[in-house]
Image (tube, coloured by chain):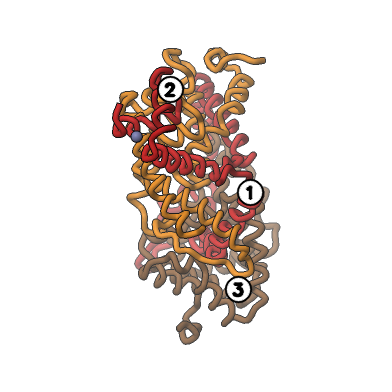
């Protein structure tokens, strides 16, 4: 019930306010051109996305927007890495995707000092040459505890294609 | 009282879950019987070693989370009683504004788009705020990607988790007082 | 401000959130640690603790003090823990812990006395985790919370004799598992 009211409120707000809010920001003109130039098919797809987007809770919308910003602040290499990782991730079946999300979520829920320690170690690891990093990953407890199938999955996620020759 | 009975009751004896009479009988027997004494020592040592597994403090977050959830629960109980009428009213109002607004917009620039296989029909564009789509166009185009981005980034950290956990366990252990032989 | 749990529950029923906070502060830590020891996983233990206390809140309206409050509370804990472990075992594949904990000597940290104690602790945790659920929960409640056999019997919904037997078997198992360890490390 409460959620419903929140949606109604936000709908009313958007519908009243949007004509006044629109068209000012940078990039919107560019987006408008892009939108007009899109094929019908693409537009239908985006409208569907939009509908899904609108039904998502505010918190996950915020998260997506935050991620969007983060992505645009990344270097070219990092962006490429994440894109190709996403492509691998998309190819996994739903169960594996879910299990990976759960693993990450568990890490998120760890005590703050532990998370910080992980980040710190990651920073240290990043300063080493890539070969060394790969060796460290493959020596880790994490890697040892994976089974064959899981290793295949994480190989694809952690080591991009062109690194294939560096593996074993 | 044979040794078998004694040994079957050693655990309850350690936990003081027996009558006084039985407790003193077992104490007496254990003092004099080597077999039962060995078994008693073995069990109570193992039991003491469990002290190594210390309690941990839940994150302060948890208390907040619980109280927050309960507040929500409380207010939703209230809402369930009070607000259906208000909701209906708002709904009617919003539909009224909504229909009026979209009529205007559709008349302006959504007229007649009928080409290609997937056609954006009037129906598709109902309930849709085109300006909002345009504002977030890039985001919407790759929404699924952005949705998973944080997870994807964090995959890099996973190989470090278990060593860090182990390190911390070791630290905790070194500050631990235990009743160890 | 030193109300009994049952008095607090009565106040919660009247909508007194301060009473709820008191109750929470009193029991949150032991409940969390029970779930943590049973599942050996902090995140899961947090989820369970949260769920337990939400249920307590929801149940306050209809709560009738029949047994001790803690008996009732830990019955909820038991049910949620058993559900969680059932779920966990059905989705094993990528779950964070593994049954086979390989012994790994972390580099740059090898005072041998320390290591053996750490090993011992890990062995303790593993031994407890190897126990069947019923035995495991029984000894967690007995050892770490000091509940009596009678109280545990009510929580687990079994006879006092069954608890006695479970605790006994658990101790024998632990003595077995930890006895061999001593020979290895000392
Ligand atoms: Zn004897």
Which chain comes out red in the rendered image? Answer: B
The alpha-carbon separation of the residues under discs 3 and 2 comes to: 72 Å
Label 2 C-beta lies within 8 Å of the nearest ligand 1 atom: no
What residue sits right under mark 2 in the picture? B24
Above or below for C36 versus B30: below
Q: Nearer the viewer, mark 3 or mark 2?
A: 2
Foreground disc of the pair 2, 1: 2
Kindly state the secondary structure of the residue where label 1 is placed.
helix
Q: Are marks 3 and 2 on the same chain?
A: no
- For image coordinates 51% across by 31% down, the residue present is C145
Mark 1–mark 3 distance (CA, rounded to whole Å): 37 Å
Determine which of the numbered discs, if any, sits on residue A78 in the image: 3
Q: Vertically, is C164 above or below A118?
A: above
Chain at tag 1: A
Pinpoint the chain carrying mark 3.
A
Q: Which residue is rendered at x = 36% and y = 55% of the image?
A: C92
Could you say which disc has been placed on residue A19 in the image? Answer: 1
* Residue closer to the observer: B1 or B92: B1
């Amino acid at each position: 019930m409460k959620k419903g009211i929140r949606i109604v409120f936000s709908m009313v707000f958007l519908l009243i306010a949007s004509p006044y809010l629109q068209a000012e920001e940078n990039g919107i003109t560019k987006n408008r051109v892009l939108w007009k130039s899109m094929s019908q098919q693409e537009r239908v797809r985006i409208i569907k996305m939009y509908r899904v987007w609108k039904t998502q809770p505010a918190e996950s919308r915020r998260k997506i927007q935050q991620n969007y910003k983060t992505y645009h602040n990344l270097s070219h290499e990092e962006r490429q890495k994440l894109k190709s990782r996403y492509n691998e991730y998309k190819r996994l079946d739903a169960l594996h995707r879910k299990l990976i999300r759960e693993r990450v979520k568990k890490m998120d829920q760890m005590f703050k000092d532990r998370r910080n320690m992980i980040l710190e170690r990651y920073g240290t690891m990043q300063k080493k040459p890539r070969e060394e990093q790969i060796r460290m990953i493959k020596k880790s407890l994490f890697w040892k505890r994976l089974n064959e199938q899981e290793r295949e999955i994480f190989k694809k996620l952690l080591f991009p294609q062109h690194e294939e020759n560096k593996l074993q | 009282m044979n040794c078998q009975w004694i040994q079957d009751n050693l655990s309850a004896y350690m936990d003081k879950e027996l009558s006084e009479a039985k407790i003193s009988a077992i104490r007496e027997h254990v003092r004099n019987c080597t077999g039962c004494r060995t078994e008693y020592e073995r069990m109570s040592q193992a039991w003491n070693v469990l002290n190594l597994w210390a309690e941990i403090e839940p994150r302060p977050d948890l208390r907040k989370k619980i109280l927050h959830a309960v507040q929500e629960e409380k207010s939703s109980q209230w809402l369930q009683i009070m607000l259906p009428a208000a909701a209906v009213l708002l709904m009617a109002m919003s539909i009224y504004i909504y229909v009026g607004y979209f009529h205007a917009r559709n008349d302006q620039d959504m007229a007649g788009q009928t080409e290609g296989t997937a056609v954006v029909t009037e129906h598709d564009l109902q309930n849709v705020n085109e300006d909002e789509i345009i504002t977030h166009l890039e985001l919407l185009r790759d929404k699924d990607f952005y949705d998973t981005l944080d997870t994807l980034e964090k995959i890099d950290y996973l190989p470090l988790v278990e060593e860090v956990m182990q390190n911390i366990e070791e630290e905790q252990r070194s500050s631990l007082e235990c009743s160890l032989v | 401000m030193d109300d009994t749990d049952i008095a607090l529950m009565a106040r919660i029923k009247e909508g007194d959130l301060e009473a709820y906070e008191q109750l929470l502060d009193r029991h949150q830590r032991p409940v969390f640690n029970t779930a943590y020891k049973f599942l050996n996983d902090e995140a899961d233990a947090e989820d369970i603790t949260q769920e337990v206390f939400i249920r307590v809140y929801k149940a306050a309206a209809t709560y009738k003090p029949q047994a001790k409050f803690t008996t009732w509370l830990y019955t909820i804990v038991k049910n949620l823990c058993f559900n969680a472990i059932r779920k966990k075992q059905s989705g094993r594949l990528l779950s964070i812990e593994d049954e086979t904990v390989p012994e790994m000597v972390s580099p740059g940290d090898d005072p041998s006395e320390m290591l053996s104690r750490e090993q011992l602790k890990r062995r303790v945790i593993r031994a407890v985790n190897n126990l069947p659920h019923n035995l495991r929960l029984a000894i967690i409640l007995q050892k770490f919370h000091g509940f009596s056999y009678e109280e545990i019997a009510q929580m687990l919904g079994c006879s006092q004799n069954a608890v006695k037997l479970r605790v006994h078997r658990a101790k024998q198992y632990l003595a077995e598992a930890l006895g061999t360890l001593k020979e290895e490390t000392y």
